[in-house]
Image (cartoon, grey):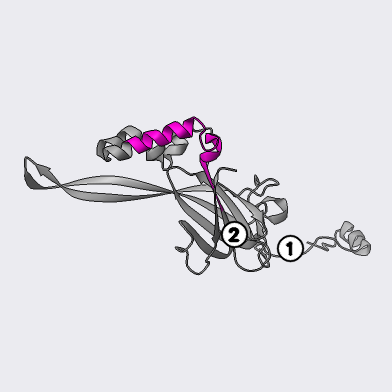
Amino acid sequence: MFALLDFIDVDLERPEANNGFYVFDLGQTVQGVGEKWEDKTFFGYAIARKIDIRFVLDDPKAKLFKCHVSASNELKVSEPAWDFNFLKNRDACAEKAPANLVGAIDDSHEKYYNGRYGPKEERFWAHYTLKFPGDLKLNASRIYQKAGNDEWCDLNIMPVQYKAEAGVEIIGKLKDQVLTTKITDYYAVWIVANIAMKDRKNRKHEVGEEISDVAQKLKGLGLGIGN
Protein backbone atom coordinates (compact mmCIF):
# COMPACT_ATOMS: atom_id res chain seq x y z
CA MET A 1 0.00 0.00 0.00
CA PHE A 2 1.35 3.42 -1.00
CA ALA A 3 -0.96 5.54 1.18
CA LEU A 4 0.58 7.24 4.17
CA LEU A 5 0.18 5.41 7.48
CA ASP A 6 0.67 6.82 10.93
CA PHE A 7 0.09 5.34 14.39
CA ILE A 8 -0.77 7.65 17.26
CA ASP A 9 -0.77 6.61 20.90
CA VAL A 10 -3.63 8.71 22.22
CA ASP A 11 -2.93 10.88 25.25
CA LEU A 12 -6.28 11.37 27.02
CA GLU A 13 -4.84 13.82 29.52
CA ARG A 14 -3.42 16.21 26.92
CA PRO A 15 -5.79 16.80 23.98
CA GLU A 16 -3.12 18.76 22.11
CA ALA A 17 -0.57 15.92 22.18
CA ASN A 18 -2.12 13.71 19.48
CA ASN A 19 -0.50 14.87 16.25
CA GLY A 20 -3.21 17.31 15.22
CA PHE A 21 -6.11 15.20 16.48
CA TYR A 22 -7.73 16.73 19.55
CA VAL A 23 -9.17 13.99 21.76
CA PHE A 24 -11.61 15.02 24.49
CA ASP A 25 -13.08 12.80 27.21
CA LEU A 26 -16.87 13.36 27.18
CA GLY A 27 -17.58 11.41 30.35
CA GLN A 28 -20.95 9.66 30.46
CA THR A 29 -22.79 12.04 28.13
CA VAL A 30 -23.01 10.17 24.81
CA GLN A 31 -26.60 9.48 23.81
CA GLY A 32 -27.55 6.05 22.50
CA VAL A 33 -29.81 5.57 19.46
CA GLY A 34 -32.30 3.01 18.24
CA GLU A 35 -34.96 1.11 20.13
CA LYS A 36 -32.45 -0.83 22.21
CA TRP A 37 -30.12 2.02 23.22
CA GLU A 38 -32.08 5.27 22.95
CA ASP A 39 -32.69 5.44 26.69
CA LYS A 40 -29.00 4.96 27.53
CA THR A 41 -26.04 7.27 27.84
CA PHE A 42 -22.51 5.98 27.37
CA PHE A 43 -19.03 7.08 28.24
CA GLY A 44 -17.19 8.29 25.16
CA TYR A 45 -14.76 10.55 23.38
CA ALA A 46 -14.82 13.32 20.79
CA ILE A 47 -12.06 13.50 18.21
CA ALA A 48 -11.66 16.84 16.45
CA ARG A 49 -9.49 17.49 13.40
CA LYS A 50 -9.05 20.75 11.49
CA ILE A 51 -9.93 20.17 7.84
CA ASP A 52 -9.90 22.01 4.53
CA ILE A 53 -13.46 21.95 3.18
CA ARG A 54 -12.23 22.93 -0.28
CA PHE A 55 -11.63 19.23 -0.89
CA VAL A 56 -15.36 18.65 -0.37
CA LEU A 57 -16.37 21.60 -2.53
CA ASP A 58 -14.03 20.37 -5.26
CA ASP A 59 -15.56 16.87 -5.25
CA PRO A 60 -18.92 16.76 -3.43
CA LYS A 61 -19.41 13.05 -4.17
CA ALA A 62 -16.16 11.92 -2.55
CA LYS A 63 -16.36 10.40 0.92
CA LEU A 64 -13.68 12.33 2.75
CA PHE A 65 -12.60 12.59 6.39
CA LYS A 66 -13.66 9.09 7.41
CA CYS A 67 -13.35 7.47 10.82
CA HIS A 68 -14.28 3.99 12.01
CA VAL A 69 -13.57 1.60 14.85
CA SER A 70 -10.81 -0.72 13.61
CA ALA A 71 -10.13 -2.56 16.90
CA SER A 72 -11.53 -2.55 20.43
CA ASN A 73 -9.19 0.32 21.37
CA GLU A 74 -8.38 1.80 17.96
CA LEU A 75 -9.89 4.23 15.50
CA LYS A 76 -8.79 4.55 11.89
CA VAL A 77 -9.09 7.98 10.27
CA SER A 78 -8.67 8.57 6.54
CA GLU A 79 -8.24 12.04 5.05
CA PRO A 80 -6.52 13.75 2.11
CA ALA A 81 -2.74 13.51 2.42
CA TRP A 82 -2.16 16.63 0.34
CA ASP A 83 -2.39 20.26 1.32
CA PHE A 84 -5.13 21.61 -0.95
CA ASN A 85 -3.07 24.57 -2.17
CA PHE A 86 -0.14 22.41 -3.24
CA LEU A 87 -2.43 19.96 -5.04
CA LYS A 88 -5.17 22.17 -6.51
CA ASN A 89 -4.07 25.78 -6.20
CA ARG A 90 -0.73 25.77 -7.98
CA ASP A 91 -1.08 29.16 -9.71
CA ALA A 92 -1.85 30.98 -6.47
CA CYS A 93 1.23 29.36 -4.90
CA ALA A 94 3.33 30.47 -7.88
CA GLU A 95 2.50 34.13 -7.24
CA LYS A 96 4.59 34.21 -4.05
CA ALA A 97 6.68 31.03 -4.07
CA PRO A 98 10.36 30.95 -5.10
CA ALA A 99 10.75 29.92 -8.73
CA ASN A 100 12.57 26.70 -7.86
CA LEU A 101 9.74 25.69 -5.52
CA VAL A 102 7.17 26.21 -8.28
CA GLY A 103 9.24 23.95 -10.52
CA ALA A 104 9.36 21.30 -7.81
CA ILE A 105 5.57 21.49 -7.35
CA ASP A 106 5.06 21.05 -11.10
CA ASP A 107 7.40 18.05 -11.13
CA SER A 108 5.57 16.51 -8.18
CA HIS A 109 2.23 16.99 -9.94
CA GLU A 110 3.48 15.24 -13.07
CA LYS A 111 4.65 12.23 -11.08
CA TYR A 112 1.48 12.16 -8.99
CA TYR A 113 -1.00 12.30 -11.88
CA ASN A 114 1.03 9.86 -13.99
CA GLY A 115 1.05 7.27 -11.24
CA ARG A 116 4.74 7.46 -10.45
CA TYR A 117 5.52 6.00 -7.02
CA GLY A 118 2.03 4.52 -6.78
CA PRO A 119 -1.53 5.08 -8.06
CA LYS A 120 -2.75 8.59 -7.33
CA GLU A 121 -5.97 7.10 -5.91
CA GLU A 122 -3.84 5.65 -3.10
CA ARG A 123 -1.37 8.52 -2.79
CA PHE A 124 -4.27 10.91 -2.29
CA TRP A 125 -5.00 9.41 1.12
CA ALA A 126 -3.35 9.50 4.52
CA HIS A 127 -4.48 6.98 7.13
CA TYR A 128 -4.06 7.34 10.88
CA THR A 129 -4.61 4.76 13.58
CA LEU A 130 -5.45 6.29 16.95
CA LYS A 131 -4.68 3.78 19.69
CA PHE A 132 -6.43 4.52 22.98
CA PRO A 133 -4.87 3.50 26.30
CA GLY A 134 -6.39 1.00 28.68
CA ASP A 135 -8.94 -1.77 28.36
CA LEU A 136 -11.54 -0.08 26.17
CA LYS A 137 -14.27 -1.32 23.87
CA LEU A 138 -14.94 1.43 21.37
CA ASN A 139 -18.28 1.39 19.60
CA ALA A 140 -20.11 3.57 17.07
CA SER A 141 -23.25 1.56 16.27
CA ARG A 142 -24.90 2.17 19.66
CA ILE A 143 -24.75 5.93 19.12
CA TYR A 144 -24.98 6.20 15.30
CA GLN A 145 -27.64 4.31 13.35
CA LYS A 146 -25.68 4.33 10.07
CA ALA A 147 -22.48 2.94 11.59
CA GLY A 148 -22.84 -0.39 9.79
CA ASN A 149 -20.66 -3.45 10.26
CA ASP A 150 -17.48 -1.40 9.94
CA GLU A 151 -18.56 0.80 12.86
CA TRP A 152 -18.27 4.08 10.99
CA CYS A 153 -18.37 7.14 13.22
CA ASP A 154 -20.79 9.94 12.47
CA LEU A 155 -19.03 12.93 10.88
CA ASN A 156 -19.97 16.31 12.34
CA ILE A 157 -18.68 19.54 10.82
CA MET A 158 -17.97 22.31 13.33
CA PRO A 159 -17.39 25.79 11.85
CA VAL A 160 -15.53 28.32 13.99
CA GLN A 161 -15.69 31.90 12.77
CA TYR A 162 -13.52 34.78 13.92
CA LYS A 163 -12.56 38.25 12.76
CA ALA A 164 -9.17 39.51 11.65
CA GLU A 165 -8.76 43.27 11.76
CA ALA A 166 -6.09 45.47 10.19
CA GLY A 167 -5.62 49.16 9.48
CA VAL A 168 -6.31 50.29 5.93
CA GLU A 169 -3.49 52.17 4.20
CA ILE A 170 -4.66 54.63 1.56
CA ILE A 171 -2.14 56.56 -0.57
CA GLY A 172 0.70 55.82 1.78
CA LYS A 173 -1.08 56.95 4.93
CA LEU A 174 -2.72 54.88 7.60
CA LYS A 175 -6.29 56.10 8.01
CA ASP A 176 -8.60 55.63 10.95
CA GLN A 177 -10.30 52.80 9.17
CA VAL A 178 -10.25 49.17 10.03
CA LEU A 179 -10.58 46.40 7.52
CA THR A 180 -12.40 43.47 9.08
CA THR A 181 -12.17 40.06 7.48
CA LYS A 182 -14.29 37.16 8.62
CA ILE A 183 -12.43 33.88 8.65
CA THR A 184 -13.98 30.48 9.24
CA ASP A 185 -12.07 27.39 10.32
CA TYR A 186 -13.71 24.01 9.92
CA TYR A 187 -13.27 20.94 12.09
CA ALA A 188 -14.34 17.36 11.57
CA VAL A 189 -15.68 15.98 14.85
CA TRP A 190 -16.27 12.27 15.40
CA ILE A 191 -17.80 10.80 18.55
CA VAL A 192 -17.27 7.25 19.74
CA ALA A 193 -18.62 5.39 22.75
CA ASN A 194 -16.66 3.24 25.18
CA ILE A 195 -19.03 0.41 26.04
CA ALA A 196 -16.52 -1.26 28.35
CA MET A 197 -17.79 1.20 30.96
CA LYS A 198 -21.28 0.83 32.35
CA ASP A 199 -24.06 2.72 30.57
CA ARG A 200 -26.74 4.68 32.38
CA LYS A 201 -30.48 4.63 31.82
CA ASN A 202 -32.02 8.07 31.26
CA ARG A 203 -35.72 7.42 31.58
CA LYS A 204 -37.81 7.06 34.70
CA HIS A 205 -38.38 3.44 35.65
CA GLU A 206 -41.90 2.38 34.65
CA VAL A 207 -43.72 -0.26 36.67
CA GLY A 208 -45.03 -3.03 34.43
CA GLU A 209 -48.79 -3.28 33.94
CA GLU A 210 -49.04 -7.06 34.25
CA ILE A 211 -51.32 -8.12 37.11
CA SER A 212 -52.53 -11.48 38.39
CA ASP A 213 -55.45 -13.36 36.88
CA VAL A 214 -57.57 -12.68 39.98
CA ALA A 215 -56.78 -8.99 39.90
CA GLN A 216 -57.59 -8.95 36.19
CA LYS A 217 -61.04 -10.39 36.89
CA LEU A 218 -61.70 -7.92 39.67
CA LYS A 219 -60.59 -5.12 37.38
CA GLY A 220 -63.18 -6.38 34.89
CA LEU A 221 -65.82 -5.88 37.57
CA GLY A 222 -64.97 -2.20 37.68
CA LEU A 223 -63.00 -2.20 40.95
CA GLY A 224 -60.29 0.05 39.49
CA ILE A 225 -57.36 -2.28 40.12
CA GLY A 226 -54.24 -1.24 38.28
CA ASN A 227 -55.42 2.36 37.59
Q: Please provide percent x and percent y for residue 215.
A: 89, 64
Q: Nearer the viewer, residue 86 or 161?
A: 86
Left or right position of 70 against 21: right
The residue labelled by disc 1 is 206
Q: Earlier in the sequence, mark 1 or mark 2?
A: 2
Category of crowding for the residue at label 2, using alpha-carbon neighbours closer than 10 angstroms: few (below 14), some (14–19), many (at least 20): many
The residue depicted at 63 percent of the width and 50 percent of the height is 144
Q: Please provide percent x and percent y for residue 25.
A: 54, 65
* Residue 30 tag number: 2
Q: Which residues are magenta?
A: 103-128
The residue depicted at 19 percent of the width and 49 percent of the height is 166
Q: Nearer the viewer, residue 71 or 48?
A: 71
Point out the image quarter for the N terminus: top right
Category of crowding for the residue at label 1, using alpha-carbon neighbours closer than 10 angstroms: few (below 14), some (14–19), many (at least 20): few
Q: Amino acid type of disc 2?
A: Val
Left or right position of 128 against 89: right
Give the quadrant of residue 96.
Answer: top left
Q: Nearer the viewer, residue 88 or 195?
A: 88
Left or right position of 180 against 8: left
Instruction: Please count the marks in the image.
Output: 2
Q: Amino acid type of disc 1?
A: Glu
Residue 77, above or below 10: above
Residue 95, above or below 157: above
Q: Please provide percent x and percent y for residue 31.
A: 61, 57
Residue 66, above or below 198: above
